[in-house]
């Protein structure tokens, strides 16, 4: 059974940083690209970032480019999202995803 468990969310002031983690199990992690998506209150799902398998190519939404960094540790079956210079509009539930399978999400709130 595929499982994705996110952690690392919380309340942070504008300009602050958070690092999200997603622990994966139930599949061969090294064979799959992984991505982060988010959903803000009352809004649709927004793709945030992706990282390929094998060559670790990274891709970002324009809204987070230059502020967020996606990475993966294949030895730990974990994907990360380092979020810097956070803005109130980054407030959302963040999910990691493999294909159409999502984790339970972790809340990120950016507020003073």
Image (cartoon, rainbow, N blue to C red):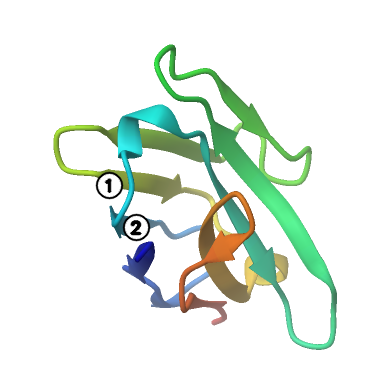
Q: Is residue 33 above or below residue 6?
A: above
Residue at the image position 77 percent from the left and 59 percent from the top: 46
* Furthest residue toward bottom: 42
Nearer to us in this view, 43 or 97 = 97
Residue bearing the label numbered 1: 78
* Furthest residue toward top: 55
Tell me if mark 1 has few (under 14), some (14-19) or many (20+) residues whose alpha carbon lies within 10 angstroms of its own: some
Q: Quadrant of the N terminus?
A: bottom left
In which image quadrant can residue 22 be found? Answer: bottom left
Q: Quadrant of the C terminus?
A: bottom right
Residue at the image position 32 percent from the left and 68 percent from the top: 8
- Residue 94: x and y in percent read 55, 68
Left or right of 93 in this view: 4: left
Of callouts 1 and 2, the N-terminal one: 2
Left or right of 56 in this view: 7: left
Q: Is residue 73 above or below residue 27?
A: above
- Residue 92: x and y in percent read 63, 75
Secondary structure category for the residue under label 2 = strand
Nearer to us in this view, 96 or 63 = 96
Residue at the image position 44 percent from the left and 12 percent from the top: 55
Residue bearing the label numbered 2: 22
- Residue 111: x and y in percent read 57, 80
Say whether marks 1 and 2 touch (CB < 8 Å): yes
Query: Exactly how many numbered labels are in the figure?
Result: 2
């Amino acid at each position: 059974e595929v499982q994705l468990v996110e952690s690392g969310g919380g309340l942070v002031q504008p300009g602050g940083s958070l690092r999200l983690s997603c622990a994966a199990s139930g599949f061969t992690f090294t064979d799959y690209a992984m991505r982060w998506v988010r959903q803000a209150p009352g809004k649709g799902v927004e793709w945030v970032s992706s990282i390929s398998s094998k060559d670790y190519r990274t891709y970002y939404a324009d809204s987070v480019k230059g502020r967020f960094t996606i990475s993966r540790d294949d030895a730990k079956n974990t994907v990360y999202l380092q979020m810097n210079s956070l803005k109130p509009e980054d407030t959302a539930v963040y999910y990691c995803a493999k294909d159409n399978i999502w984790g339970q999400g972790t809340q990120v709130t950016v507020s003073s």
